[in-house]
Image: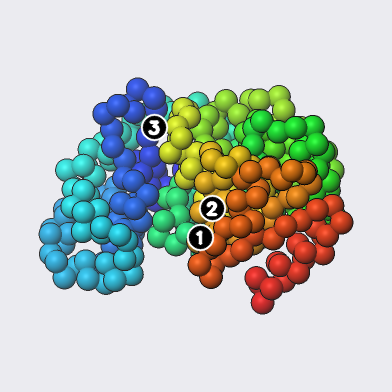
Amino acid sequence: MERRTQANVLISSLINRQEAKYVKPLTINEYGYFACWLAMNGFSEEDLLNPSSIDSMETLWSTASSHYTAKKAVNFYRLDATIRNIQFERIRGLLKRESDLSNSLKGWQRAGIWILDRHHEHYPSALAERMGHQSPALLFGVGNPELLNKLGIAFVGSRNRTLNDSQFTQYYVSQANKLEFQVISGGAVGIDMDAMTASLNNGNSCVGILADSLYKAASNPIWQQGLQSNKLALITPQYPESGFSTANAMIRNKYIYAMSCAAVVVCSGEKGGTWEGAQQNLKHGWAPLFVSKHEEPLQLGNSKLLAYNSKNKLQATPINAENFSELLMSKISNSLS
């Protein structure tokens, strides 16, 4: 592992389950600001592994003028509170976990897990561009990292899908694959798995962005053929042994949209993860959104998304089997022009 990546893991990630209750790695906003401050003041993340450099950083950190350019560049909500939470006593404590990291790395490497920081050539450029300073510090993954910069269409939907929902998912995926797009989804039971397995069965590739448990997913039989054929990458911003949390799932949903050329909502309730993620996408304008009208009466979430007023950002586009391919290419062409 490169020293820069090692430093990023130490300051921004948990390393094992045992420390989860008492270790506080930098949050997304804290890391986003701190990484920017380091760069603006002539430091790199790997300098954190040099004690004399840390002393220099700590002295400079207490100087208000050293923050001027970084604060202007980042401009987070409640940024001053974020800065106050970044204390060098905390940074030094996080960096002392090198031996624990070494132990965890052995198990992760045996499972085929790799780690990308923002500077890595395979770190998804769309994610970095759209999320900016709030893009994840790290991506843990298994499979083919080159897929992370291949054009893809996001497919999202409820766990409690019907047979008709699954069949239309497979149809939409086949059309996207014919247009040479891979699938990007969340790897969860339901529409996510339907879309990802459909793409793999079509001989195409897919990326699963997981909210938790990458270590377990790496050995899940459902993914083995895709991993062995280099047609699949499973990634997560959470450390590989993390458990599920609703907050992490919502963060993951942002990244699904931010990595995609467009997104398809197959079926959605009027609340829950699918609805919240699609609503956020409409608000922020990460990717053109398509909502399926394959069932009548229309699912409540689908109907609400089509009526959603996004205040001049994005409006969802209704699709069906007859118009999906044409509308997909039209929307993507317009968004790239």
Disc 1 + disc 2, Cβ < 8 Å: yes
Q: CA distance from mark 3 to mark 1?
A: 34 Å
Residue 324 rendering spot, x and y as whole percentages: 80, 57
For badge 1, the amino acid type reads: Lys
> Secondary structure under badge 3?
loop
Q: Is residue 197 left or right of residue 148?
A: right
169 on left or right of 237: right
> Around disc 2, counting alpha carbons within 10 Å, would you say few (fewer than 14), some (14 to 19), or many (20 or more)?
many
Choose between 69 and 191: the one closer to the eye. Answer: 191
- Location of residue 26 in the rendering, given as x and y in whole percent from the top left corner: 31, 45
Name the one closer to the observer, 246 or 126: 246
Coordinates of residue 172 in the picture (x, y in percent): 80, 49
Q: Nearer the viewer, mark 3 or mark 1?
A: 1
Residue drawn at (57%, 42%) of the image: 270
For the residue pair 337 and 330, the one nearer the viewer reads as: 330
Q: Residue at x 61, y 53 (%)?
A: 305
Query: Measuring 21% from the left and 42% from the top, which residue is drawn there?
Result: 90
> Disc 2 residue type?
Gln
Specify few, some or many for label 1: CA neighbours under 10 Å numbering under 14, 14-19, or 20 or more.
some
Tag 2 secondary structure: helix
Q: Is residue 109 above or below residue 336?
A: above
The quarter of the image holding the C terminus is bottom right
Mark 3 and mark 2 lie on one chain; the one further toward the N terminus is 3
Disc 3 marks a residue whose amino acid type is Ile
CA distance for labels 1 and 2: 6 Å
Residue 307 is at least partly visible in this image = yes
- Name the residue beneath numbered marker 2: 279
Residue hosting label 1 = 283
The residue at 71%/24% (across/down) is 221
Residue, disc 3: 15
* Percent x, y of residue 39: 33, 64
